Image (cartoon, rainbow, N blue to C red):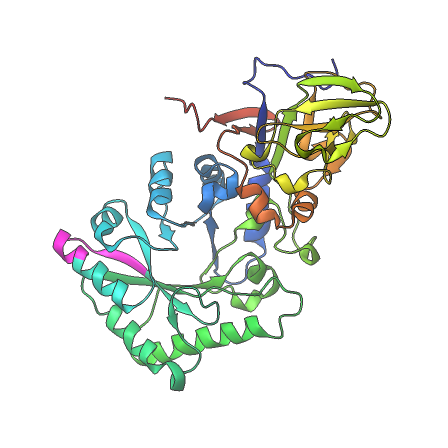
Amino acid sequence: MKGAVAVSDFLKRTWAEINLDALQDNYRAIASSLSGNSRVMAVVKADAYGHGAGMAALAFREAGAAWFGVSNLDEAMQLRSAGITEPILVFAYTPPSEAANLARLDVSQTVLNGNYARELEESAAAAGVQVHIHVKIDTGMSRVGLPYHSERQDGDTLREIEAICGLPHLIGEGVFTHFASADEEDDGGYTRRQFNRFMEALGRLEQRGVTFRYRHCCNSAGLMRFEDMHLDLVRPGIILYGLPPAPWMQGMLPLRPAMELKTVVSMVKTVPDGTPVSYGRTFVANGDMRLATVPVGYADGYARTLSNRAQMLLCGQRAPVVGRVCMDQCMLDVTGIPEAREGMTVTVFGKDGEASLPVEEIAELAGTIPYETICLVGKRVPRVFRKNGEIAGRLNYILPEK
């Protein structure tokens, strides 16, 4: 049967297919665009943006990744457990009491401010270890980091960084900042001002005898737009997974989306004119209608805001979502797809033959951004990894393989 699923491959209800070839092609496209001796720190936080951090990191390593970036210590431990031996930087907060674990795992920690650095130093000293750190300088994101806009305004920051780098149990190997609006087509020169502040701070620190092996500031949008800002490392995130940081940046690099979300038709029925569909009866059939129920809902990451708005692909055609999206299921109007049958594969986003339904479209209809849409694909949705068209691995969060 065309479109039917083979249950011998893996249990198919709703699943995400991850194209490892696309991940590696995206990595190589990014790496080949870099200037000077800049290297890639592959950002695999948030379970590699929902793609499965272990398998994604191994694919990036095979393609040449020199560093990995994560949000927290647990994510770093996950990479080490997956066999990643390359340097890892934790971007956000780790309790200073974890200094011994940071050292044991050889994981670098971001220093958010002077108080944090002193607490981390105290914990490292008590454990008899040294911790590698990257100092975060806030040049205009106003999230975390030591603020720097000018020496006159933020001279205390320079003195604080000098003091941090003198702490005996902290090894100041890196320094970085984060751009707030590099993905805006016209940001009024804000990104350039952030970069200039960062470089001025580094120059002032060098005058004080403080230097760093790794300087980095470019996120995905930054590395695509500002070649002179690549420095020693760049930190691509969303573009590793084949999506541009903003719609206007489409085509600036040859990227391929690596995730497709699939489900199946669980039931097909015909309902008469005037039949209400789903909770709240927000949709009423305006004539005899064939409905297909699919087992995907907001508990799987398919937003309730897509009710009566989105479409899915079935047999290479678009089928509208009708009625409210439920926790575990939703309904499609397949009146115009007479071949629709139970057991057929449905594409929630991705490709079905020549037909395409990009995740950007789903995100826009849901009132959000593609970053959130892929990150929210639920943990009861298994990831199926493909390499050269064949299944290369599976990840079931509920029933992990032993």
Closest to the observer, 142 or 204: 142
**Residue 44 visible in this rendered orientation of the protein:** no
Is residue 112 or residue 265 the one in the foreground?
265
Please provide percent x and percent y for residue 378.
52, 35
Residue 118, picture quadrant: bottom left
Quadrant in the picture for the N terminus? top right
Kindly give the residue lying farthest to the bottom in the view shown: 152
Q: Position of residue 147 (x, y in %)?
A: 39, 73
Residue 119 seen in the figure: yes
Quadrant of the image containing the C terminus: top left
Q: Residue at x 47, y 34 (%)?
A: 55
Percent across and percent down for residue 79 are 38, 40
Choose between 387 and 144: the one closer to the eye: 144
Say left or right for 379 vs 267.
Answer: left
- Give the residue drawn at x 36%, y 36%: 83
Q: Residue 114 lies in what quarter of the image?
A: bottom left
